[in-house]
Amino acid sequence: MKTTLKNIWGMAKVSLKQSKTAYLITGILFALGVAQLIVQLSIPPNPDNQTLAVANYLFVLPIFIAIFIAARHFSRIMNLGGKRKDFFWTCLPLYAAAAFAVSLAGTILTVTVDALCAGKIGIMNLWDIFGFMRRGPVVAFFQMGALLLLAACAAHTLTLIQSKWYGYVTDALIIAVISVFTPIAPLRSALAWFFKMIIFHEIAIAQIVSCLFVTALVYGASLFAVRRKTI
Amino acid sequence: MIRFDNVTKRYGNTAAMDGFSWAAERTGIYCLLGRNGAGKTTLMKLAAGHIGPTAGAVFVNGAQVKMFAMPDAAHFVESGAAQFNVKLSALFRYAADVNPSFDLDFALALAKRFKLDLNKRYKHLSFGMKAMASTLIALSSGREILLLDEPVLGFDPVMRKVFYDMLQEAVAAKPKTVIVSTHIIDEIEKVADSLIIIDKGRLVLCCGMAEIDEKAYSVIGPAEPVKAATEGLRVIGETKAGGFLSRYVYDRRVKPSDKYTVSGLGLQEFFIGLVGTEDAL
């Protein structure tokens, strides 16, 4: 019953090969982003024209990978002879690899494409909006990687628990937290504090540690679902 | 190897297994029989760790089966199992990736024997071929315990013959415990070593096939001598036709007599006699 690196690597390989839908969706969005950028650059340049940075379209990749693995791959992997324990230990490093790969690609695009377009058109880039680029591209890579990992793990856990009563309760709780916390000032500040910790914190290491801490909690919660999920 | 200790499994108010205790201690092919809803699939899923018991415990090779820590030794497959929609050759490679003990060469050889087109995508296969693909994945899994739920569902007679031959060869080549559930009783009785009959989540009978040959028989003749001969024996069913009576017995043999005829009982008649008497005989 021991989970070995061979098991994890084998399961990760199958999951990545079978994530073609996630690659396709990301590819289409990225291509549309590139097309939009080209159009913006082709017409007379105007810095007031705002366009979303192409790097941002890549964000959907780790999230869609997580959704498809949790929703579609689980039963199929079990039917091939996989084990729940191996599945649990495979997904986290897989999402980490996807998150940091996207973060790397996005950071490179930010420092190259966005820099080339600067002054010609206005670029909206989450790397800048979140303030990650203030400390340079290397730190930005780690900050965005940690944030994307958290997003992927949240998508994974939420997908796994859907169709169960505790999934519906969680969905209702999330909606309730957002709708109740937002209009009430003290609760809104708690929500703002949470987002500051995982996104906007001035100290990069605090933001990264916060993301990894919440990731551990969220991913740890998926253990409950993996144990019970029917095959 | 496999042990069920007083296992109960409930789905809502329905008990699929009800205080079920049983152990398989020898390798070989076990024929698992039961009517629809008797608990066959539940039994297999419990042994594989696909589901957990409501009460009691299941052990595989001495270790308690848990849903998170599924037993390494067991592989469960059902005929309608969901699989990745890729070419069969890729599906077998996936199985080898996911399960390091998977024997890819063996799987490819079996696929050739069954004339499975390895270049066909899983969804393009017929129902029988899909079942065959999942069964081949189980047979090649390298695991000591195979739990095959209706593996021949959708197979034509030729495929079933090849499948049973292959099953015997696989067990002979490398001893393993194979539990096969099926409703095609006449065919499995030729290859099974042991028989498990369950009904309403309870164990009705567990014995070797030789024991069935020896102890299951019918006594046919005029009612009075048949009744007298079978008195005190375990009569599992009976039919009447005019003044003649046929009694199906699972017990020691009666003494031969010219007043009645004693003949062996097929597994199907035996099974129906044990679990289906109220509406079948």
Image (spheres, rainbow, N blue to C red):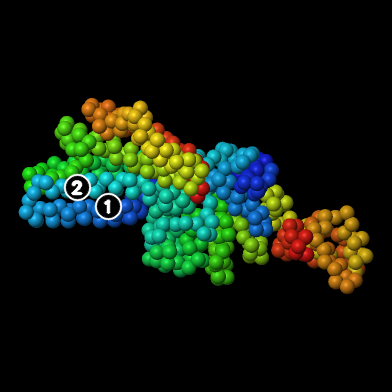
Picture layout, residue A156 above or below residue B80:
above
Q: Is residue A35 left or right of residue B257?
A: left
Residue at 88% of width from left, 54% of height from top? Answer: B232
Picture disc at residue A26: 1
Residue at 90% of width from left, 66% of height from top? Answer: B223
Picture layout, residue A74 above or below residue A201:
below
Numbered disc 1: secondary structure? helix
* Residue sitting nearer the eye, A226 or B193: A226
Chain for mark 2?
A: A
Q: Is residue B72 left or right of residue B246?
A: left
* Residue sitting nearer the eye, A63 or B107: A63
Q: Residues within 10 Å of mark 1 (few under 14, many from 20)?
A: some
Of circles 1 and 2, the one toward us is 2
Q: Position of residue A146 (x, y in %)?
A: 28, 36
User: Of the residues shown, which amino acid type is indicated by label 2?
Assistant: Leu
Q: Residue furthest bottom?
A: B242
Q: Position of residue A179 (x, y in %)?
A: 38, 38
Does residue B119 appear in the picture of this structure?
Answer: yes
User: Of the residues shown, which amino acid type is indicated by label 1?
Assistant: Thr
Q: How far is disc 1 from disc 2 in space, using C-alphas?
A: 15 Å
Q: Quadrant of residue B30?
A: bottom right
Residue at 63% of width from left, 53% of height from top? Answer: B40
Q: Quadrant of residue B246?
A: bottom right
Chain for mark 1?
A: A
Q: Position of residue B15 (x, y in %)?
A: 66, 47
Q: Position of residue B199 (x, y in %)?
A: 70, 53
Numbered disc 2: secondary structure? strand
Picture layout, residue A56 above or below residue A201:
below
Does residue A89 appear in the picture of this structure?
Answer: no
* Residue sitting nearer the eye, B160 or A46: A46
Residue at 38% of width from left, 66% of height from top? Answer: B119
Residue under circle 2? A52
